[in-house]
Amino acid sequence: MGIYDSTFLAYVCITVVLFQLSRFLLAGLYNHFLTIRLGIKFVDFKYLGKWAVVTGCTDGIGKAFAEILAEEGMSIYLISRSQDKLDELAKSISAKYKVDTKTLAIDFSQGDEIYSLIEKHLAELDIGVLVNNVGLSYSYPEYFLNVENRDALFKDIIRINCVAVVDMCKIVLPGMVERKRGAIINVSSLAAKIPHPLLSVYSASKAFVDKFSVDLGLEYESSGITIQSLLPGYVATKMSKIRGESLMAPSPKTFVMNAIRTLGVHGRTTGYFPHTVMDYLMNTITPQLVNMFVLNALLSLRKRAIKQKNKAQAQAQPGY
Ligand SMILES: NC(=O)c1ccc[n+]([C@@H]2O[C@H](COP(=O)([O-])OP(=O)(O)OC[C@H]3O[C@@H](n4cnc5c(N)ncnc54)[C@H](OP(=O)(O)O)[C@@H]3O)[C@@H](O)[C@H]2O)c1
């Protein structure tokens, strides 16, 4: 190859890289910053239907979805485990946003019978939005064979993270298809896309949610239904055990305010620009380096959690 050919090739490569990078940055800037600052919405939530159903809604990301969808004028159907927390949230949403609310106490770790109950309660409602948010993870990162109560925990993770998503779609989608309008947000996790050792059952369950959502989205796009796979990085909630919010671990409200603007724009997204940058970097850097980095980070979380657990156990001993 002559010197002119290789210079030409180098220019082509640099142009392609610069083009991809500016596309990524401009799309990020537009979707994650300008739309929020300018108040641009891609979805008219009230047009989609009267009700938004949110699972796992009394805390964290689910609670933020319930409040932000109520702010958009939707009536909220709250489904979570504890009736007292549901009542309190329903009362505060109705008072603050002047919308109707309904509640249903359901434990998604239970068997198939819960879905006939949910179906009975949701029948006849004009449901515009379903947020499949409820999720369960390990209490701390741990080797597969060392996870405490692993038989029960792994089954619960699969029931809560996977079965609930499929069964809730089975209940809500027929009405949406009939009305030719609706949106389903399935909360997966960035753990589905990047290596996540020591949380392998959780991350695999989230990969299921991601793949299911993308393919279901393609099936029902032409019926007027938007289905989104939402893959957040860390958000400061009870599940992540992150107390203070930061740029990389936003509060649930900041996260959902960003994520909701991506509905109708991205079928598969982290929903939050700093998480999109992290995803981009993790998928650009050499896999060996990413694996090493993530494993070390999760091993140090594991070490800290075990130390805290041992300390708490020692303090609980009589005579401490
Ligand atoms: N936080 C993160 O960093 C992060 C990152 C990526 C993805 N996600 C995903 O985001 C979703 C929400 O997580 P989060 O961090 O917001 O969780 P969270 O703060 O722990 O809240 C979980 C909610 O689900 C309810 N819930 C828990 N178990 C339930 C069950 N068996 N049946 C019914 N409701 C149940 C809880 O209420 P009750 O206890 O009152 O029932 C609570 O309202 C999950 O799918 C999670 O995997 C979270």
Image (tube, helix red, strand yellow):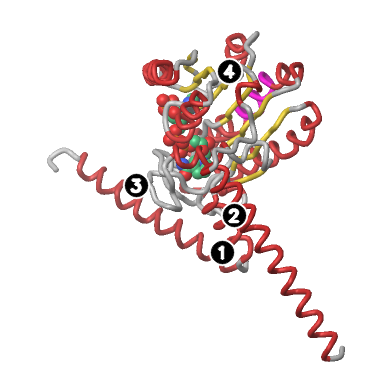
Where is residue 306? Give x, y as percent: 35, 51
Where is residue 187? Give x, y as percent: 58, 37
Q: Which residues are magenta?
A: 163-172
- Where, by quadrant of the figure, is residue 266 drawn? top right
Q: Quick check: 155 left or right of 142? A: right
Q: Name the mark on residue 194.
A: 2
Give the residue type that dot 4 points to: Trp
Give me the C-alpha separation between circle 2 and circle 1.
8 Å
Where is residue 218? Give x, y as percent: 78, 36
Q: Which residue is mark 4?
A: 51
Quadrant where the N terminus sits is: bottom right
Q: Name the mark on residue 244.
A: 3
Q: Which residue is mark 1?
A: 290
Do the residues under discs 2 and 4 have CB atoms within 8 angstroms?
no
Whether residue 8 is situated above or below residue 186 in the rendered picture: below
Do the residues under discs 2 and 1 have CB atoms within 8 angstroms?
yes
| Mark 4 Cα shell of 10 Å, populated few (<14), some (14-19), many (≥20) | many
Give the residue type that dot 2 points to: Ile
Residue positioned 52% across, 19% down in the render: 76
Give me the C-alpha separation between circle 3 and circle 2.
24 Å
Where is residue 154? Give x, y as percent: 54, 37
Q: Quick check: 83 left or right of 127? A: left
| Mark 1 Cα shell of 10 Å, populated few (<14), some (14-19), many (≥20) | some
Callout in the foreground (2, 4): 4
Whether residue 208 is situated above or below residue 163 in the rendered picture: below
Which label's residue is closer to the chain start, 3 or 2?
A: 2
Give the residue type that dot 1 points to: Val
Extreme residue toward the left, this view:
319
